[in-house]
Amino acid sequence: MTTPEDIAWIRFKAAEKLGWREVEYSRDGYLVGHAPGRKDIKVVPSYASDIRAAWEIVQSLFFQGAQVRVENVLPGAKQCIVEIHWPGSPIYRAIHPQPSVAICMAYLECQHA
């Protein structure tokens, strides 16, 4: 089971890997930082809990040349599998009930991205 603390950690680590800088919690409790290439402070997207935000990771991987597969494990199963692969390298895989968490977990395992 993934706890809220786990989700927060996954979000933080995904943001760092995507290039967010000076990521920290504001006095209001928001995770904020400098987005890649930006000088202003923004709220970090909820990569681990928002599928739209997680899809930004998939797009980034796609534009870097990776093959990304997202699917349910078995029809009717409440598990999502994500596989990330670059030609000539191993497949990075994660399984989780929440697709956004599975995307982040597989992304965090990648050595290329």
Image (cartoon, rainbow, N blue to C red):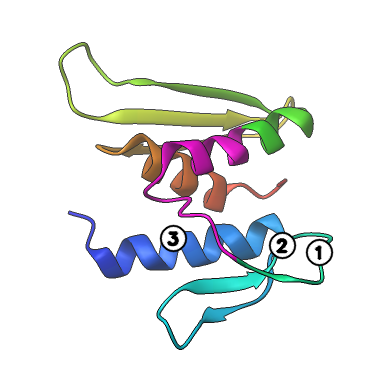
| SS label for mark 1 | loop
- Is 18 a magenta residue? no
Instruction: Find residue 79 and report its horizontal and vertical position in percent.
Output: 24, 30
Q: Residue at x 37, y 29 (%)?
A: 81
Front one among 93 and 8: 8
| SS label for mark 3 | helix
Give me the C-alpha separation between circle 1 and circle 3.
22 Å
Looking at the rendered structure, the kind of residue marked 2 is Ala
**Quarter placement of the N terminus:** bottom left
Single out the mark in the foreground, 1 or 3.
1
Q: With respect to residue 70, does 56 lie above or below? A: below
Quick one: label 2 or label 3, which is nearer the N terminus?
A: 3
Looking at the rendered structure, the kind of residue marked 3 is Ile
Quarter of the rendering containing residue 95: top left
Mark 2 highlights which residue? 35
Quarter of the rendering containing residue 60: top right
Specify start and end residues of the magenta stretch as a single range.
Answer: 43-58
Quarter of the rendering containing residue 107: top right
| SS label for mark 2 | loop
Instruction: Find residue 76 and report its horizontal and vertical position in percent.
Output: 15, 15
How dense is the environment of label 1, judged by Cα within 10 Å: few (below 14), some, or many (20 and up)?
A: few
Mark 3 highlights which residue? 10
Looking at the rendered structure, the kind of residue marked 1 is Arg
Give me the C-alpha separation between circle 2 and circle 1.
5 Å
